Amino acid sequence: MVDDKYLVDGYYPTIGIECHVQLKTKTKLFAGIDNDARAADPNTLISHICLGLPGALPVLNEKAVDLASRAAFALGTSPQTFSKFDRKHYFYPDLPMGYQITQFDQPIIIGGQVNAAVEGVQMVFDVTRAHLESDAGKSTHPAGKDYSLVDLNRAGTPLLEIVSEPCMHNSAEAKAYAHELHLLMKYADVSDVNLFFGNMRFDVNVSVSKDPKVMGTRTETKNLNSFRSVNDAVNYEIKRQIEVLESGEKIIQETRGWLDDSGKTFSQRSKEDSHDYRYFPDPDIPPIVLTSDYIKNIENSMPILPTQIRNNFKSIGLEFSQIETILDEPAIANLLMYIQDAHGDSTAKTVANWLSGPVQKMVSDEKVNWLQVAESAPHLSTLASMLSENKLSSTAAKEVLLDVIIHNSDPLKIAESKNLLQVSDSGELEKIVSEVLASNQKASQDVANGEMKAIGFLVGQVMKSSGGKANPGIVMEIIKKQLGA
Amino acid sequence: MVHWKTIKQEANDVANGTTSALANVNKSLKLIQDNEEFGAIISVIKDRSIERAKFIDAQIAKGQKVGRLAGVPFIAKDNFLTFGSETTAASNMLKGFNAPYQSTAIEKLEAEGAICVAKANLDAFAHGGSTENSDFFVTKNPHDKTRVAGGSSGGSAAAVTLGLAPFALGSDTGGSIREPASFCGVVGLKPTYGLVSRSGVVAMASSTDVIGPITTNVADAALVLDIMSGKDLLDSTTIDNDPKGYELNGAKSNISGMRIGVIKEYMDDGLDPEVKKVITESIEIFKKAGAVIVDVSLPSLPTALAVYYIVVPAEVSSNLSRYDGQRFGHNDINAKTLEESYVNSRSQGFGSEAKRRIMIGTHVLSSGYYDAYYKKAQTVRTKLINEFNNSFKSVDALIGPVTPEVAFKIGANSDDPLKMYLIDIMTVAANLVGVPAISIPAGLAGDMPVGLQIMAPQQKDRDLLILASEFEGLIK
């Protein structure tokens, strides 16, 4: 039953998302051929298997099973102990065998969840299933030509298709789900998750209904490759479908495409043209049987996932947007967790502020990239410990920070060369303090009489004499001690 | 028609210089030429086999170690991908197809020095039991040219019978090695499913296709299996070899006290009386040797053929999808649209039997019929497997005829596909169940050979070969 808060002009929208995740295996799903076709000339990454030559047999790439199993844990479940491959038949020139190898009724992942923040509020979205399948090749149809071109480099690339329940009801939820799924696949390290290269492609199923208990006829808008297009396509379809229904017509169950430039969906093919895929178990590929030891090993190799990291950072008082910025880069989130472990919450918070403040700005100004930030992790950690040990003021630390990242160099050396190290050696400070107190009799007397307002002035004087290198906290303690305040 | 010694002797003769690889190849090529009238051979691999023979002879001359089959010629069914000639599967669809890689079985045999000299005729895409479905020509039975040689490995069986080479390779999806071996009076072995890699063999039905040898004697079949078998990284359905290997080297089983089951359903009505007589005599031979003969009934056996003609066409229709004229094989160059290109290329490239099986297979897999046909057939198949497993708890081997009758006249069944399918009635079960089975010459019905079929439990190929070899000795 859809909540009334989702109502749009008297209609309840419902959205389900299918996402194709390209797994980052070195070779294809069923052939020992390079899986990275980005820089390759057409039809150079192919074998007798990719071409579907007579007698060619698919042999499952176990690495793809490892990655799918990791994805299962990222989705909050574990992989099925038994799953199998099926053949899905249709004719198309970029499908060499005349069938796609996929998992029909016994997929590797059944169930699961995606916890996503929708405008700051955590929500749980249910996953129906996820299955392994091999991608088809790529067809291009040159304009004005009487031929089409087929590139089979992509044929056989391993995909994990993750299917959600129809559990979303507006574009913000759809976008948040897509974004969180992207984050999960990134953390699970199963895909390069590059949207530009199509490493993750979203198909959105949208329907609207006047009855909150019954879903309307749905359309499927395919191959969306950005969170914005997921958002916009959902909005467009909701609006279009309501207009169609309001004009007294019916929604046709169909596949639609997305025009990014005009922000519109368009009809591709209706259900009437749909194929009978004649699924049946692929007799060339034995079922995937996973032992409990195997599953345990995968589970043990999983990193800390976004939900836990989020809770962790929330507990040290980080802001929502700050957390999301840091989470976007697993290496950065890991760095921060390490700093929290090693130097405590308050230092971690300072570093978090650097990362979501000046560092984030440098990244968006393209002065550095997140990879460089991650690479300077050991130095950032040193910088954090210098801060927590009062060797640097937070202002000085911020000044050193940018150099540390840009040059990937030791913050101690940079601080030394910039003469920013704080003097925390109490012997030296005692001396400076007594000199300052002697030449500021009036203020000293005030402090000694309990008028603490004047202490700020004295600290300032000590800082001045030390050339800004004194640790102000320690200076204050020494002044109090010397004046008996 | 005896032109060759045993494979082992032939290999020894080459290795010790009694003869040469080149002489063997030339002898085989000459015999092939002299026997063209039988229609056993589709193409000859002349240049490559002469080159390979010269290379092996040079190795021997230099005193280098050579393989176990050095200089032994053989003939492969034309659905094995090979270098040096076309691989057509006897179909217009693949006419002119030059394979860019070789089947694993061929690679393994070549690694031991064997030389593939020719490609044998078959029913196109291995669909049939008489080689009459070859898109090119019919193979004639060497014992009677008016009769079929059987099929689908009819060319291979006829070639071995004619002595064109010491051995040939076949593929057996529902009896396609055993039936022509029986019709021609030679040994045909269908190993356990998965024991020999299917990589590089034009697929018929993936879950029942098996590769095996056709030879003149059991020891030769054992030697060839020993070389071809074992796990292959290119075929994930392959299994490990028997650690003892398959070569016989005089190994004996103790027939006395062995329990041999006679399959009741195969001895019932429909079996030609003369064939029955030969099989009954064979049973007597086992009995005299001390075997305990027991009648075994496999109640689901009468459904095996029906199951087979659902499961196999289903897989056939899927496996033949890749022949779409787009990347290889027959392509209608006059087609104006993609749809026309598909329809015309496939309509022209496939013969009527392939089309019949594509239609049956497409039907049984289509939504609304899947449960009634394919799924039910798989359920019965599982039942059949259980019945075989149970029977093998009480017997060491099962015996019976290979076919209900001897080789029939060419054209006798051509107009009746159902009658043609009935020839497979006694062979399909072994494929559905995956057990090893062999056809071994057991006598004559009239002038035509009759084979005895022996089946053993899965992966007991070695025991099967030993038992068959002993029967071979007893019947001589």
Image (tube, rainbow, N blue to C red):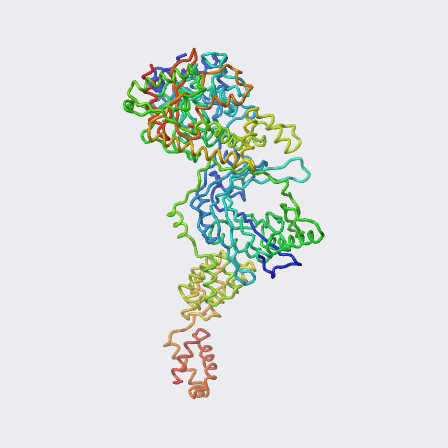
Q: Is residue B121 above or below residue A463?
A: above
Q: Residue A431 appears in which quarter of the rendering?
A: bottom left
**Where is residue A225 drawn, in percent x and y?**
58, 50
Quarter of the image with the N terminus of chain B in it:
top left
Q: Is residue A136 left or right of residue B237?
A: right
| Numbered marks: total | 0
Left or right: B431 as drawn, with respect to B314: left
Relative to residue B369, is residue A462 depicted above or below?
below
Quadrant showing the C terminus of chain B: top left
Q: Is residue B51 at all visible to an observer of this figure?
A: no
Compared with A187, B422 (above or below) is above
- For the point 58% across and 40% down, the residue is A138
The answer to which of B231 and B452 lies nearer the viewer is B452
Q: Position of residue A310 (x, y in %)?
A: 48, 61
User: Could you say where residue A109 lies in the image, as x and y percent from the top left?
Assistant: 47, 48
Answer whether residue A122 is visible to the viewer in this image: yes
Residue drawn at 45 percent across, 19 percent down:
B270
Q: Please name whichever residue, A151 or B4, is drawn nearer the observer in this view of the structure.
A: B4
Q: Nearer the viewer, residue B10 or B131?
A: B131
Q: Left of B423 or right of it: where is B341?
A: right
Q: Position of residue B327 (x, y in %)?
A: 57, 32
